[in-house]
Image (spheres, grey):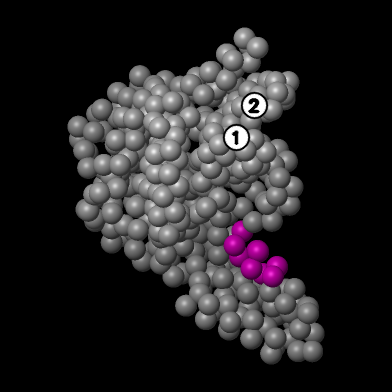
Amino acid sequence: MRRVVVALVLAGTVAWTFPEVHLGLAGALVGLLVELTSVQAGLALGAVLFGLRITHLIIGVGAELKSWTRPHRRIVLRTIPLLATIGTTGLKPGVRRRTVLTGVFAIVFCAAVAALLWLTAGSSFGKGLALAATGCFVVQLLPVEKAGHTSLGWYLFRLPRLTGRPLDELEARPRVTAGMDAYQRGDLDEAERIQAELARDHPDLLVVAGLKVVTSCAREQYLDALQTAIGLTGREGLTTRELAFVMATTAGIAVLAVEAGQFPAEVGLETARSMFDNAYEAGYPKTRANGSLAIIALIEGDTAEARRLAGHSAESSEDAHGRADDLVTIARAWMADGDNAKARELVAEAHELAGWSPRVAATRARLEIS
């Protein structure tokens, strides 16, 4: 369906704007960008109106120009201010109702933007603009939920009918968010207390197991975390999207276990690569694996590749701990190349973001000794 809509928009633009096809296609490109941006803007406004938390807001593409990072939110401004990406989570009870209302608001907002663009249809550029925006809006109405993308149509057509464990996963978000907040500020005792309560009330939820995984990793108990994650891969009833995240998480933990010397490299790295391949097939975006792939490159001695991958991961990081972890990987790569001065600069920023993190603390201690 997506390809059909794209083909119709292109054909319609060419036919409607001939002989000024170049202006029509230019307008179509701008219309696509405007409508994609309006999707994220609508979700952001809806989240504010209906009580969801915005966890991250990444504006533009390219290298990071400026960022504002807090334990529970990260805002990034990039060099080319085109497009945007936001993340939301439940903060108050009634998560499904709030999320549905957020999605419906975004749909109305996007429809209004597309309608306004038809006012420009008096020129070839405006015709392409209006056609592309409308086509993009139609595609957004298709109910799609994948590891790297959730359409507006899913909020309207699928989310209201959610039942069973998937619904419980959603409604448990406020308590899980409280646990993740404690984790992000380094209060691991509080995070583990919340996780234990959740595990008692909801032992079958993936989000609860996820909280256990991150707290175990924060304690450097990578084998315990790996056991928890591997146990999830064999569960029945997982959606393709859920399975993609579980396999990618398992791969990431295996890499950390190898780096910490708790798992044999020849077994752990092969396991990680295999799990990532399976996750990619299930729709997991390859770019989200850059942080773990950077550590693999570092373990294997390819420091330049480790810096490159970790740099990409740091620029696209969605939380303070994630960015701190990537900065530490880059710092360790510079240390391996004998440049402790650059490593200290990176670790200083990482310490400000997540000084409690074992990887940050250990790297900082090594640099102080050196």
Q: Is residue 322 left or right of residue 332?
A: left
Mark earlier in primary sequence (1, 2) = 1
Label 1 element class: loop
Query: Quarter-wise, where is residue 131 in the image?
Result: bottom right
184 is higher (above) or lower (below) than 139: above
225 is higher (above) or lower (below) than 130: above
Can residue 40 be seen from the camera position used here?
Answer: yes
Q: Assess disc 1: are there few (<14), some (14-19) or many (≥20) residues with their C-alpha within 10 Å of its C-alpha.
A: some
Label 2 element class: helix
Label 1 close to label 2 by CB (< 8 Å): yes
Q: Which residue is mark 2?
A: 336
Q: Is residue 39 magenta?
A: no
Q: Is residue 186 left or right of residue 194?
A: right
Pinpoint residue 84: horizontal percent, then vertical percent: 61, 53
Q: Is residue 34 magenta?
A: yes
Q: Which residue is drawn at the image coordinates 28% and 58% (left, top)?
A: 162
334 is higher (above) or lower (below) than 12: above
Q: Which residues are magenta?
A: 29-37
Q: Residue furthest front?
A: 266
Q: Is residue 275 left or right of residue 59?
A: left
Magenta-drawn stretch, dominant element (helix, strand or loop)? helix
Amino acid type at image mark 1: Gly
State which quarter of the image contains the C terminus: top right
Pinpoint residue 182: horizontal percent, then vertical percent: 41, 26
Q: Assess disc 2: are there few (<14), some (14-19) or many (≥20) residues with their C-alpha within 10 Å of its C-alpha.
A: some
Mark 1 vs mark 2, CA separation in Å: 8 Å
Q: Which residue is mark 1?
A: 301
Query: Quarter-wise, where is residue 263 in the image?
Result: top left
Q: Which residue is drawn at the image coordinates 26% and 42% (left, top)?
A: 231
